[in-house]
Image (spheres, rainbow, N blue to C red):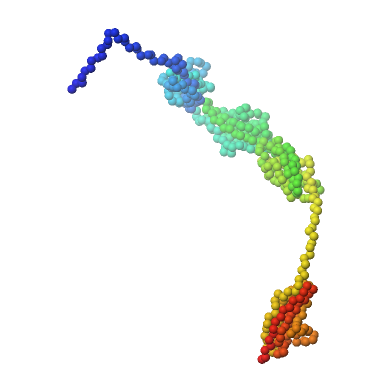
């Protein structure tokens, strides 16, 4: 079924036509302007043969956003002319191009131009003319492993460095020191077909620096850098002083030497000398700080100190010595002892072991024992039934007192020897008794 047709709208005879749409904003002149890129970077020769040259480069540093980069044109001209001709019919987008169908032996000037909608960029030109000729072997410096790091020698030593290289035909060898040609008075170069020798008869500190060896075959070259450092003994410390003296100690301070021998200072050696003997003795070796405390000095002595600086070559020939002296003063000690108070050890008698009751059999000797202490030594007296016993009067009884042990020995007691026995101890401070009962049994 066909859709219903719509009649076109009719215009009113008196209606005014609608105004046309406003024109779009015109771009400014600056927005329409298209700019070329900057010149390509680092145009170099990668390879060449008897009829071609291969070059490489890097893209331009600046590429406008509104015009971009369409490609590159490679142009050449023979040395001595300004007739530049493009060798690529179409723009190349690669950063590598082979210039073919050239004549062996020609010397070409080569440049690269970047092209976009804004036009041609400034050309990037290889500085030296390129000889169209095949290279047998590219030059190469074969730097020994030990020369890939800093090469250190002492002042006065001989330097004889043999550095092999390769290349065909024979490379042209050149040397630079810190970017300048070598001084023939200081260094000699001997070059053969396979190596180059750097020879310095007696090294001096001025020979330190960066040496660069360059081997070149036509338009190809290779470089190697050698860092040589010539060192010697350092100078003495710039200054030294005694900062403080106390007790048996001296504090020293010093400053680093003005001349470090062209290498870092690895330490210091500190020595002391007694004024009486004048002999020097090491007290600190390989010490790395700029201050030290010297201890265990002898009272009453006067000391002088000196310091040597040290680096990889050894100790400095000269030293820094203290101008002043350090005296360890004897201290006067006023000793006042505490008055001695003698202890009073006097003591009244006291039995530490008392007598105990005992029983024995007629005819069998027995002993009564007790112990006593006291100061002064107490006098011992034995009594039986309150009657004082005496060795001299009755030999049956034997009384012994040794080391505070009191013993009464009754020899072969009879039935009438039983009773109450008492031991009395007496000195100036008093007296004390201890007693017991003795029972004598019949057989």
Viewer-proximal residue among 435 and 310: 435
Asked if residue 141 shows in the view, the reply is yes
Most distant residue in the bottom direction: 443
Quadrant position of the N terminus in the picture: top left
The image quadrant of residue 286 is top right
Viewer-proximal residue among 442 and 281: 442
Give how far across and how far down residue 275 sits, in percent. Answer: 80, 46
Give how far across and how far down residue 122 sits, in percent. Answer: 49, 19
Residue that appears at 71% across and 87% down: 418
Vertical order, 186 against 341 (above or below): above
Give how far across and how far down residue 82 sits, in percent. Answer: 50, 15
Please indicate whether residue 346 sits to the left or right of residue 166 in the image.
right
Viewer-proximal residue among 327 and 338: 338
Quadrant position of the C terminus in the picture: bottom right
Viewer-proximal residue among 313 and 157: 313
Most distant residue in the left direction: 1
Residue that appears at 51% across and 18% down: 79
The image quadrant of residue 264 is top right
Asked if residue 105 shows in the view, the reply is no
Vertical order, 401 against 110 (above or below): below
Please indicate whether residue 19 sits to the left or right of residue 387 in the image.
left
């Amino acid at each position: 079924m066909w859709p219903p047709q719509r009649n076109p709208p009719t215009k009113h005879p008196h209606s005014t036509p609608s105004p046309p749409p406003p024109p779009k904003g015109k771009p400014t002149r600056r927005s329409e302007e298209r700019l070329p890129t900057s010149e390509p970077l680092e145009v170099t020769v990668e390879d060449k043969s008897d009829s071609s040259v291969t070059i490489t480069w890097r893209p331009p540093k600046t590429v406008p956003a509104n015009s971009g980069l369409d490609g590159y044109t490679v142009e050449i001209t023979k040395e001595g002319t300004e007739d530049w001709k493009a060798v690529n019919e179409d723009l190349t987008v690669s950063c590598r191009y082979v210039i073919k169908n050239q004549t062996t032996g020609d010397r070409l000037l080569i440049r690269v131009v970047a092209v976009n909608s804004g036009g041609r960029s400034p050309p990037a030109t290889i500085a030296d003319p390129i000889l169209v000729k095949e290279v047998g072997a590219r030059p190469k410096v074969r730097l020994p492993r030990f020369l890939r790091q800093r090469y250190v020698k002492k002042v006065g030593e001989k330097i004889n460095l043999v550095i092999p290289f390769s290349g065909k035909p024979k490379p042209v060898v050149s040397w630079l020191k810190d970017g300048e040609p070598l001084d023939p008075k200081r260094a000699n170069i001997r070059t053969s077909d396979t190596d180059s020798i750097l020879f310095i008869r007696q090294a001096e500190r001025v020979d330190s620096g960066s040496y660069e060896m360059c081997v070149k075959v036509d338009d190809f070259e290779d470089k190697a850098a050698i860092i040589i450092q010539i060192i010697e003994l350092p100078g003495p410390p710039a200054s030294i002083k005694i900062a403080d003296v106390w007790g048996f100690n001296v504090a020293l301070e010093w400053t680093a030497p003005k001349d470090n021998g062209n290498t870092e200072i690895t330490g210091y050696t500190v020595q002391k000398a007694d004024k009486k003997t004048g002999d020097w003795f090491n007290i600190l070796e390989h010490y790395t700080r700029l201050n030290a405390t010297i201890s265990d000095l002898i009272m009453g002595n006067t000391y002088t100190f000196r310091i040597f600086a040290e680096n990889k070559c050894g100790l400095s020939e000269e030293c820094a010595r203290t101008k002043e002296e350090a005296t360890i003063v004897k201290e006067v000690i006023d000793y006042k002892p505490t008055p001695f108070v003698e202890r009073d050890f006097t003591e009244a008698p006291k039995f530490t072991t008392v007598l105990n009751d005992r029983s024995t059999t007629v005819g069998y000797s027995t002993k009564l024992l007790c112990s006593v202490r006291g100061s002064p030594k107490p006098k011992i007296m034995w009594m039986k039934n309150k009657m004082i016993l005496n060795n001299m009067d009755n030999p049956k009884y034997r009384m012994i007192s040794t080391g505070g042990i009191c013993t009464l020995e009754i020899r072969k007691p009879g039935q009438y020897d039983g009773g109450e026995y008492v031991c009395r101890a007496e000195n100036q401070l008093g007296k004390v008794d201890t007693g017991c009962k003795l029972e004598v049994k019949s057989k």
